[in-house]
Image (cartoon, helix red, strand yellow):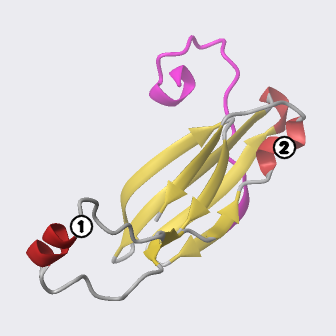
Amino acid sequence: MRLLTGTAPASATSFRFVPQSITSFGPTVLVEGCDHALSISWVHACTVSDGIITQIREYFNTSLTVTRLRNSGPSSPPSDLASTRSSSSTAAITPLHCPSLWESSVSSWFGKSVPGLVLAI
């Protein structure tokens, strides 16, 4: 982080962002890479709108799985929510189907255990 923000001492080793893969899912662009010399892997998840990056999330030394959330139940909610509530003491639970769209691979190259995260788009 200190290298990225410019607060690292001048003698610090520089960090190289060399992409190993670039993948997109609609407005989400995933760029994965590593710096072999420093044993650091990274994933940048960018949101792009009209050719401009509007949001970026950075993950370092983390295994990342991207999934898409979507409802696998009925396509429309009940028309009368009040009657649904009164007919049962528990609300109906609609299952979600979360298919895995992409998984990072570079973090496993270094043979060390890293935390895993799920990015839902």
Image quadrant of residue 71?
bottom left
Which secondary structure class fits the magenta region best? loop
Which residue is depicted at the point 79% across and 53% down?
A: 105
Tell me if mark 1 has few (under 14), some (14-19) or many (20+) residues whose alpha carbon lies within 10 angstroms of its own: few
Checking the image for residue 9, the label placed there is none
Give the answer, above or below, for where 107 lies relative to 40. Answer: below
Q: Is 100 contained in the magenta span? A: no
Which residue is depicted at the point 38% across and 87% down?
A: 74
Q: Is 2 contained in the magenta span? A: yes
Residue type, label 1:
Ser
Where is residue 56? Give x, y as percent: 43, 52
Give the answer, above or below, for where 73 lies relative to 42. Answer: below
> Regarding mark 2 in the picture, which secondary structure is present there?
helix
Where is residue 112? Give x, y as percent: 84, 30
Tell me if mark 2 has few (under 14), some (14-19) or many (20+) residues whose alpha carbon lies within 10 angstroms of its own: some
Where is residue 24? Give x, y as percent: 57, 73
Q: Which residue is mark 1?
A: 88
Q: Which residue is mark 2?
A: 108
Q: Nearer the viewer, residue 52 or 61?
A: 61
User: Left or right of 61: which side holds 83?
Assistant: left
User: Left or right of 12: which side holds 92?
Assistant: left
* Residues drawn in magenta: 1-22
Where is residue 82? Give x, y as percent: 9, 73
Residue type, label 2:
Ser
> Regarding mark 1 in the picture, which secondary structure is present there?
loop
